Amino acid sequence: TQGVSSAASDVYKRQAMKHILRTIQGKADQMSPTYQQLARYILAHSASVAEMDISTLTAAAGVSTATVTRFAGSLGCSGYLELRQQLKKVIFNNYTSLDEIHGVLSRDAAHPITDVEDALRGLPGRFQLIDKGLIRRAAEMICGSRRTLIVGNQISAMFVPYTQYLLGKYRDNVMDVSDMSFETDKQLSACGAEDCALVFALQRYPNATIKAIHRLHACRVLMIIISDSDLFPFEDLAEVMIHVSFKNSLAFAPVMLVYSVIYDIILNAVALDPGTAEENVRKFDEYVALNRIYYEKGR
């Protein structure tokens, strides 16, 4: 019972922390006058507070360090550092296309920089921040599953053929179920906990992707979800949730980051089960040779 209670508490905390500003607003009326003073300041200056150390905030809001620490704890945070991290997530995910335009216009003309250059510099560091344990866990799920289902719509659709082709060379039964058609739904009804799904959810979430997530959950299919939002609304339905958020860049950086994550998952899957990978590659090469799909050597 204690384990179930603890798990339920963890889920509740994740849901409550989805949007820290909403949590503050919802609790403001029940707070003490000092907490209300601090809450008003944070709500009015959230972007600035996300970058402030605790002493700067106490001076600006007119409260003590102890008040800030206790305030963070009352919101379910382990301390002020976690409160700042939650604020940064909200600010990042409220970053819109209008902000991108403003960012372009505000660049220093004497030191021009393109999004591609910025992204290339930032990609290695951002990739290092991704929990490699999650990538390993995703590979283990794929190796242990009967089949791997893939979902990706709109901008995320570009990852589906790449993943299906590359992963399909090393693993059997890799299926695209993105469209959620009647035929797809019939296929899903035969799926269950022995299967896993790799879901790409970038640049908002099309209805087909949302429908697929709910359908996969109803079928008890384990999900690996890759999203560019730290506030992904279906995070609690995923067995593995990988965030590839990348601020101050257009589509290039997160797209390259997703391809890197996919490739790393596949490399891990091959390393975990090289026997299956070798057998499937042999079958693949035999099929290619039999059907003369590629030109023969020397031609």
Image (cartoon, grey):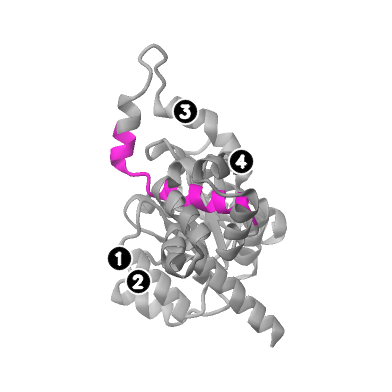
**What residue sits right under mark 3 in the picture?**
118
Residue 82 on the magenta span = yes
Graded by Cα atoms within 10 Å as few (under 14), some (14 to 19) or many (20 or more), the crowding at tag 4 reads few
Comes first in the chain, label 3 or label 1: 3
Question: Looking at the image, is mark 3 or mark 2 earlier in the sequence?
Answer: 3
Say what amino acid the circle numbered 3 marks. Answer: Asp
How far apart marks 3 and 1 lie (CA) works out to 32 Å
Q: Nearer the viewer, mark 1 or mark 4?
A: 4
Task: Report the Cα–Cα distance between label 2 and label 1.
Answer: 6 Å
Distance CA(mark 3)–CA(mark 2): 35 Å
Q: CA distance from mark 3 to mark 4?
A: 32 Å
The reply to whether the C-beta atoms of the residues labelled 2 and 1 are less than 8 Å apart is yes
Pointer 1 residue? 207
Whichever of callouts 3 and 4 sits on the residue coming sooner in the sequence is: 4
Image x and y of residue 69, in percent: 63, 55
Residue at image position (46%, 64%) is 23
Q: Are marks 4 and 2 in contact (CB under 8 Å)?
A: no
Instruction: Indicate the amino acid at tag 4.
Output: Ser
The residue wearing badge 2 is 211
x and y percent of residue 26 in the render? 42, 67
Kind of residue at badge 1: Asn
Numbered badge on residue 55: 4
Q: Give whichever of 35, 263 is nearer the camera.
A: 35
Amino acid on which the number 2 mark rests in the picture: Lys
Q: Which residues make up the magenta segment?
A: 79-101
How much space separates mark 4 and mark 2, taking CA atoms? 46 Å
Q: Main secondary structure of the magenta part?
A: helix
